[in-house]
Image (spheres, grey):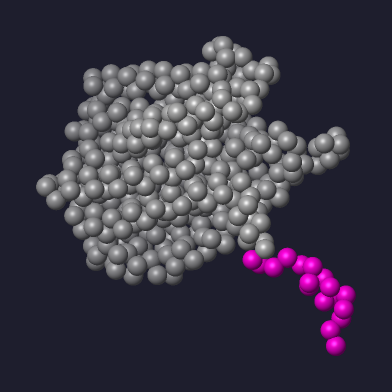
Amino acid sequence: MADPQLSGVAANSPSLRQLLAKARQSPLFRQILTAVSGTAFAQAINLAMIPIVMRIYGPEAFGVLGTFSSISMVLIPVAALTWPMAIALPRRVSDAKALVRLSLRVALAIAVALGVVLFFWGSALADLTGFAILTPYLMLLPLAMFSGAVLEITQQWLYREQRFRLTAGGATVHALCYNSMRSLAGLVSASAPVLVITTALYHAMYASVLLGAMGLSKGKAANASEAAPQVEETELDDGKSLIKRYSDFPLFRAPQVLINALGYNMPTLVLAASFGAVPAGFFALCAQVLSMPTNLMGKSVGDVYYPRVIKAIHAGERLLPLLAKGVAGLGLIGLVPFGALMLFGPQMFVIAFGAPWEQAGEFARWLALAEFIGFTARPCTIAIPALNLQGRYLAVEIASTALRIAAALAGAAMYQNPVAVVIAYGAANSVISLFVIAMVLQEARRLDRSRCRDGQ
């Protein structure tokens, strides 16, 4: 006979359908779903086009692209000294607009300075560093750097306004345009110059799509802005005041991002310098495929979590459960794609991209665990600026980058084998991501306990 007490509890317990219905009513859930859906469409387009692009361009051309992209990815995040990341923080719209202007001016000045240096000394620098294959493309780097900064500024403004529907649509349109351009151009000339030039235009195209969409919806956005409550607190829109208030971004965040980008792109550079363009091409494809789950879910969730964490801090909410749920949720989502790569990486790459790319699948097998851990860490890394951990994170990144570089160089020097470089690099990344998760969750717990003691 059933226990009536247990029966009553069961009757009063919400069903799975009720829980899902309640979740769908959550603004945060809807924002994540909107961001993820747009990114999912874009990544589905990218995923569908990669096998075609791989069969048009060979590993050597992709190796030249990988080397160019690695240097670009080191430069782009610091093009505006990471001030765009501060756009979501001010309460007043005027302060956020001032940060937009500041970011654009800084990015333009840095891009022009880089162009001057490359114009006069670019060839000598390429020969000195062992990247002579990039000499014809050096003047594309300032363009990629500035357009990458414009894209980051545009995205951060849209995140601040919580216009996730616009960013989702922009991601899909851009994916269609970019992949069509790259594929059609490759049919005309399947060469490294075509691949590098089309890739250099990637950020410019993306920013143009988002800015065009913003222009079309300007009237609606203006009405929403007028309806929003105007906060009249102590923020000042004076440029010097903003620079001083958000000085931790160029002082701490920019060096951290630069060091982080250098560490992540080091394997491609080491492989290109030590073993030639072909292994670098294998790694470039491997990195692109492994980044897809992160781009699909991790970035979208992170973009939603950033303003959500800021809101939680302002409202005095508990941060540890918010971040822990994000880490656990992404862990469950990432098990299938990353687990499949660990088990069947080479076979999957041969089926998807053709026999010449089997070695890239072997690289992916060894990197999948590290990428999985980094994928789950996204809610924690996105919360670092909001938790004022940028100074501490800079120290972590310095040590982490030293570990990544040492691992990649040791793999190349000691074993003289591209796979050894990948294995050593993956092991270093796994340790680093686990440490960052532990550090951020510990800080969130400390802040929650401090608020409890203070009665908030």
Q: Is residue 410 visible?
A: no
Q: Is residue 320 visible?
A: yes
Q: Nearer the viewer, residue 82 or 439?
A: 82
Residue 282 at x, y = what percent? 30, 55
Image quadrant where residue 243 sits: top right
Residue 330 at x, y = what percent? 56, 56
State the residue at coordinates (64%, 35%): 310
Asked whether residue 6 is drawn in magenta, I would say yes
Residue 234 placement, left or right of 31? right
State the residue at coordinates (52%, 51%): 33
- Residue range highlighted in magenta: 1-17
Image quadrant in which the N terminus is located = bottom right
Q: Nearer the viewer, residue 150 or 264?
A: 150
Image quadrant in which the C terminus is located = top right
Residue 272 placement, left or right of 76? left
Residue 315 at x, y = what percent? 73, 36
State the residue at coordinates (35%, 62%): 361
Determine the main secondary structure of the stretch shown in magenta: helix
